[in-house]
């Protein structure tokens, strides 16, 4: 069996983790396939009156520890296989973070960029009409992911309320704060990774003023750039789907944000302030101290892993490093802060949002940040201790930590 599809890779990592625990290996059979995956034809009416049809998915991989939780992505490369894999990763991540959730994921096979606002609203509402029998605050709770955002979640919550006949904010997380969203959800994924990095700093040799390269400048990547810049790091390279830029003296992130908002791509910032363009795929080989992967899966692979120069790599994206690349980085003694731990901040603050929605009482930003920091440090400390104790990588330790919680919930 090849280990280099995302699903096989996640399953192989669980199987490896099982070797470090005193458990019956047949227990892993439970996660060989999802509990349920629903596929639908989603139809939207375009502004010109025509109808277009798209493949849509929702997968609930495992609900052993609670209702399934996971984002919705809009992307032309979405497949059932990809969504199921991401749903398994969510299962592991929620267990790792000790949240009372299982793992799910959803997606639509579409490039949403050419759509108007009305068409995007039709897409979100259409998604709920396809899956209103699957999702629910005690069953399966969507959130934003690639190409979806708080506005998408507002439309989803509104359409769901219309279908079930009552306002049910806990059906989705990542909503605008005016509709029951949590303070601090917008930058939660990056902030969780940032708290982890700060906590791990002395163990992994991360020092103030470090030079950072960031792949992906969307929700996760742009917030991480801001947090690291305010902490005194120099962001020397950034990419998005259209290209990459470099600047030895550090890119001004506020100005870059403004340029990206105006022109839709980071390369529009090249040409001034010592910033120049490079090819998007050159970003991973930029000379720096920390590489943040915040774009898509499989971006560091057997073909480019040997070119990575950063001795510390933080995975904000899901599954951005292939199994072969992982081995290459390991042989160079590079430290990888693994996705299921490093990007857990998003689902952790989503959990806080779900709790606030159920109790109808909302917390301050200071409380959210403090709770998130505590969680990242607690789980980070447990995983670091496991890695040292068993002499395994942080990724393996993260899987061992999560698997022991999953198994503990099976009777
Ligand atoms: P997003 O859509 O806001 O941003 C994605 C960014 O990646 C964009 O800037 C896009 O241009 C860029 N990109 C796409 N292909 C690229 C390529 N080939 N090279 C360089 N850049 C490329 O999405 P996001 O929410 O920031 O998610 C990014 C990753 O983080 C995904 O893997 C997602 O699953 C993961 N993640 C996100 C959250 C969250 O709360 N948003 C939580 C956990 C994990």
Image (cartoon, grey):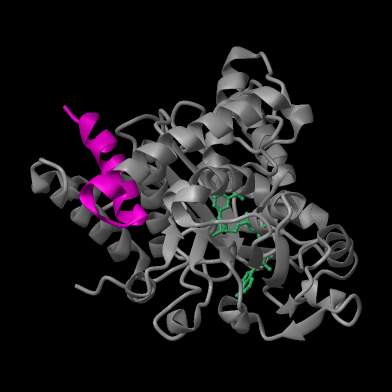
Quadrant where ligand 1 appears:
bottom right
* Residue 87 spot, x, y in % from top left: 41, 50
Label count reads 0
Residue found at x 50% / y 73%:
299
Residue 35 visible from this viewpoint: yes
> Considering the image in quadrants, where does the N terminus appear?
bottom left
> Considering the image in quadrants, where does the C terminus appear?
top left
Residue 383 appears left or right of 176: left
State which region is magenta: 386-411
Instruction: Give 117 or 207, whichever is nearer the viewer.
Output: 207
Residue found at x 61% / y 58%:
146
Residue 215 visible from this viewpoint: no
Q: Magenta stretch: residue 319 in it?
A: no
Residue 122 lies, with reference to residue 170, above or below; the image says below
Residue 140 lies, with reference to residue 261, above or below; the image says above
Residue 27 appears left or right of 55: left
Residue found at x 24% / y 45%:
389
* Residue 140 spot, x, y in % from top left: 46, 36
Type of secondary structure dominating the magenta stretch: helix
* Residue 222 spot, x, y in % from top left: 72, 57
Q: Quadrant of residue 216?
A: bottom right
Residue 333 appears left or right of 304: left
Residue found at x 39% / y 51%:
89
Instruction: Give 319 or 330, whichever is nearer the viewer.
Output: 330
Residue 70 lies, with reference to residue 45, above or below; the image says above
């Amino acid at each position: 069996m090849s280990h280099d599809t995302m699903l096989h890779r996640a399953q192989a990592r669980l199987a490896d983790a099982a070797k470090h625990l005193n458990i019956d290996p047949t227990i892993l059979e439970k996660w060989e396939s999802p509990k349920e995956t629903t596929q639908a034809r989603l139809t939207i009416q375009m502004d010109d009156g025509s109808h277009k049809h798209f493949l849509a998915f929702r997968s609930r991989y495992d609900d052993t520890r609670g209702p399934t939780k996971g984002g919705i992505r809009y992307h032309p490369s979405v497949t059932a296989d990809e969504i199921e894999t991401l749903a398994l990763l969510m299962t592991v991540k929620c267990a790792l973070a000790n949240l009372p959730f299982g793992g799910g994921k959803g997606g639509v096979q579409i490039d949403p960029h050419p759509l108007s606002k009305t068409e995007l609203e039709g897409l979100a509402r259409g998604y709920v009409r396809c899956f209103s029998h699957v999702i629910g605050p005690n069953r399966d709770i969507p959130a934003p992911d690639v190409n979806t955002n708080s506005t998408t979640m507002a439309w989803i919550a509104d359409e769901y309320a219309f279908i079930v006949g009552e306002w049910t904010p806990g059906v989705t997380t990542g909503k605008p704060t005016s509709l029951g969203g949590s303070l601090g959800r917008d930058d939660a994924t990056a902030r969780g990774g940032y708290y982890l990095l700060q906590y791990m700093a002395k163990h992994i040799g991360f020092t103030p003023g470090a030079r950072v390269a960031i792949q992906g400048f969307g929700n996760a990547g742009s917030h991480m750039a801001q947090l690291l810049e305010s902490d005194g790091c120099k962001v020397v390279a950034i990419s998005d789907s259209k290209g990459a830029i470099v600047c030895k003296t550090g890119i001004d992130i506020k100005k870059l944000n403004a340029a990206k908002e105006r022109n839709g791509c980071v390369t529009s910032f090249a040409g001034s302030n010592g910033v120049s363009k490079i090819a998007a795929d050159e970003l991973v080989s930029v000379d720096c101290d920390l590489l943040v992967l915040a774009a898509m899966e499989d971006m560091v692979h057997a073909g480019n892993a040997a070119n990575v120069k950063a001795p510390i790599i933080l995975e904000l994206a899901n599954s951005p490093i292939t199994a072969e690349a992982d081995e290459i980085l390991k042989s160079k003694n590079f430290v990888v802060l693994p996705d299921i731990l490093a990007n857990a901040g998003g689902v952790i603050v989503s959990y806080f949002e779900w709790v606030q929605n159920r109790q109808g009482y909302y917390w301050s930003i200071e409380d959210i940040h403090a709770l998130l920091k505590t969680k990242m440090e607690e789980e980070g400390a447990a995983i670091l201790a496991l890695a040292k104790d068993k002499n395994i990588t942080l990724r393996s330790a993260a899987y061992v930590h999560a698997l022991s919680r999953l198994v503990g919930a099976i009777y």
